[in-house]
């Protein structure tokens, strides 16, 4: 059982909306509305231990996860929320050993999440143009212990004549005009490599989707992830009145290599909605059907 040592990061948890991520220090006392959190009470105890404040409130000393580091990141820009991060990871098949380019470092929370999965053999190469944002991102990445797996460079890939990477597995774009760097992303991606863009508005999605088609990307998907939390209590379970609403839209695509003769066949057409005829059998999952027999 791992015990808390001096300088370990600890998530002091009172409830879901009141929790603090701090580095444990023997002389540190943190004043809150539920009382004083005295660090020396947790140093030497196992992670998960409970302590009592001077106001009689119970605080749990938890070992922070990447989720905690992401949500407690110092923010210079809007972060990508875990509800979006999880789907992105599944959609692109994120795994250890991959090589990823991130265009637009922001606060570094997304970078931290990526590095936590790519390690120990994978790497994130992240590029930004704002030194102030980069300084904050660097601190957030270091705080989560992911610096070894991240290379941060000041470079404007919109105007760069030579791309800094090639044959990467994924390019992730977090810019206000992601369509501008689609050609650059294509140059860096391997065949069938994944493209991801964070888009706050639908207008951005429209322009991006058009640019992706023009640059020979396929398997294009635009999504919005919605999470609804449930307050499970004995006899009083209901949905929570607190919720994370719209955070962003996420666009996905994959680099394909289509000869010019075949691209003509793939010219955009307006697809008609499928209409189920009365003769059509139920489209329920076959595995479920077989269970009923």
Image (cartoon, grey):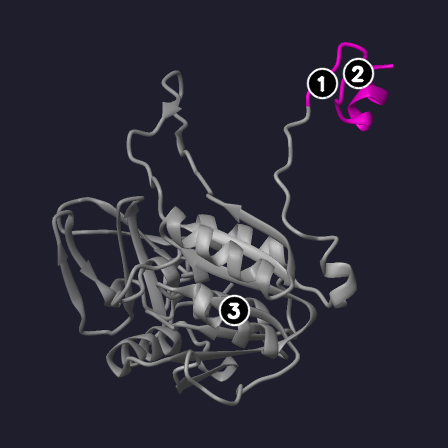
On screen, residue 6 above or below 47: below
Q: 291 left or right of 12?
A: right
On screen, residue 104 above or below 82: below
Mark 1 residue crowding within 10 angstroms, few (<14) / some (14–19) / many (20+) = few
Q: 38 left or right of 252?
A: left
> What residue is shown with label 3?
182
Q: Tell me, yes or no, whether the two marked residues, 2 and 1, touch with CB atoms within 8 Å.
A: yes
Residue 46 in view, yes or no:
yes
Secondary structure beneath dot 1 equals loop
**Residue 233 bears which disc, if any?**
none
Lower position in the chain sequence, tag 1 or tag 3: 3
For the point 47% across and 72% down, the residue is 181
- Residue 2 on the magenta segment: no
- Is 159 in front, or is 92? 159
Q: CA distance from mark 3 to mark 2?
A: 41 Å
Q: 169 left or right of 64?
A: right
- Residue 279 on the magenta segment: yes
For the point 36% across and 72% down, the residue is 8
Residue 48 in view, yes or no:
no
* Residue 263 horizontal/vertical position (percent): 72, 60
* Residue 219 horizontal/vertical position (percent): 65, 53
Q: Which residues are magenta?
A: 275-293
Secondary structure beneath dot 3 equals helix
Secondary structure beneath dot 2 equals loop
For the point 44% across and 39% down, the residue is 226
Q: Tell me, yes or no, whether the two marked residues, 1 and 3, touch with CB atoms within 8 Å.
A: no
> What residue is shown with label 1?
276
Magenta residues: mostly which secondary structure? loop
**Residue 280 bears which disc, if any?**
2
| Image quadrant in which the C terminus is located | top right
Q: CA distance from mark 1 to mark 3?
A: 38 Å
Q: How many marks?
A: 3
């Amino acid at each position: 059982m791992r015990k808390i040592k001096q300088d370990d990061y600890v998530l002091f948890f009172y409830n879901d909306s009141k929790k603090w991520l701090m580095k444990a220090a023997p002389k540190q006392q943190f004043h809150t509305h539920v009382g004083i959190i005295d660090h020396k009470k947790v140093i030497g105890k196992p992670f998960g231990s409970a302590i009592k404040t001077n106001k009689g409130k119970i605080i749990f000393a938890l070992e922070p996860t990447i989720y905690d580091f992401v949500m407690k990141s110092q923010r210079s820009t809007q972060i990508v929320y875990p509800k979006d991060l999880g789907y992105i990871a599944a959609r692109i098949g994120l795994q250890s050993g991959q090589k990823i380019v991130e265009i637009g470092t922001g606060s570094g929370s997304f970078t931290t999440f990526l590095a936590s999965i790519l390690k120990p053999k994978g790497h994130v190469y992240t590029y930004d143009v704002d030194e102030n944002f980069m300084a904050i991102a660097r601190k957030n990445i270091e705080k989560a212990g992911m610096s070894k797996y991240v290379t941060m460079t000041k470079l404007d890939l919109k105007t760069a004549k030579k791309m800094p990477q090639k044959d990467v597995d994924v390019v992730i774009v977090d810019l206000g005009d992601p369509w501008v760097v689609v050609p650059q992303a294509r140059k860096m991606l391997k065949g069938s490599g994944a493209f991801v863009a964070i888009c706050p508005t639908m207008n951005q999605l429209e322009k991006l989707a058009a640019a992706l088609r023009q640059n020979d990307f396929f398997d294009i998907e635009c999504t919005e992830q919605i999470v609804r939390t449930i307050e499970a209590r004995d006899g009083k379970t209901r949905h929570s009145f607190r919720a994370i609403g719209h955070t962003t839209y996420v666009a996905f695509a994959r680099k394909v290599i289509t000869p010019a003769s075949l691209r003509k066949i793939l010219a955009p057409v307006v697809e008609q909605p499928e209409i189920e005829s009365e003769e059509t059998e139920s489209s329920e999952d076959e595995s479920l059907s077989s269970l009923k027999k």
